[in-house]
Amino acid sequence: MKYLILLSILFFNPINAESVSKKTLTESEDKALSALCKIGLNADGGIWKNKDINAAIATIKWGQNYPDNIQATAYKTCNSGGYLK
């Protein structure tokens, strides 16, 4: 019964990237993202492998409500946000 209720909530109230609003960044947060994205790209010997750096990127950009998992959110934020230039 619990699962049926949870499924109905998820089905009738889908959450997607468009429904999660980005927060307005300060200049300091924008600079931090520029630095963290360059570090996170190859952290710990792999692309987006460091969970803490990914979480920092996602949290700075989105607050506590990011649209995807932490690794995907960090990747999308850095690539589409122009922070890897």
Image: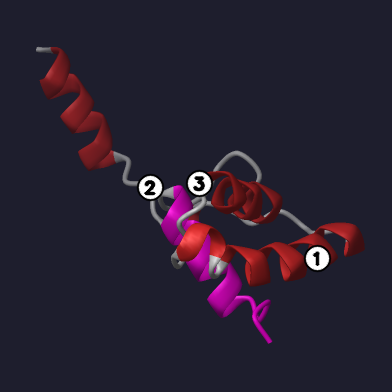
Q: Which residue is mark 3?
A: 51
As drawn, 41 above or below 85? above
Residue at (18, 31) in percent of width and height: 8
29 or 24: nearer the eye?
29
Residue 23 picture location, percent across and down:
71, 53
Identity of the residue drawn at 45% across and 55% down: 71
**Crowd rating for badge 2 (residues with CA inside 10 Å; few <14, some 14–19, many 20+):** few
Image coordinates of residue 53 in percent, x first then y, are 61, 51
Which quarter of the figure is the N terminus placed in? top left
- Mark 1: amino acid: Asp
> Cα distance, mark 1 to mark 2?
26 Å
Q: Residue furthest bottom?
A: 85
Is residue 64 placed above or below 85 in the rendered structure?
A: above
Q: Residue furthest front?
A: 45
Q: CA–CA distance between discs 3 and 2?
A: 23 Å
Front disc: 3 or 1: 3
Q: Is residue 66 above or below residue 4?
A: below
Q: Position of residue 79 (x, y in %)?
A: 55, 77
Relative to 71, 25 lies left or right: right
Asked whether residue 18 appears in the rendered view, the answer is: no
The residue shown at (59%, 63%) is 40
Q: Range of the magenta residues?
A: 70-85
Mark 1 lies on residue:
30
Q: Residue 32's spot in the image, x, y percent?
A: 79, 60
The answer to which of marks 3 and 1 sits earlier in the sequence is: 1
Q: Quadrant of residue 28?
A: bottom right
For disc 3, the neighbor class at 10 Å (few under 14, some 14 to 19, many from 20) is: some
Predominant secondary structure in magenta?
helix
Q: Earlier in the sequence, mark 3 or mark 2?
A: 2
Specify few, some or many for label 1: CA neighbours under 10 Å numbering under 14, 14-19, or 20 or more.
some
* Residue 15: image tag: 2
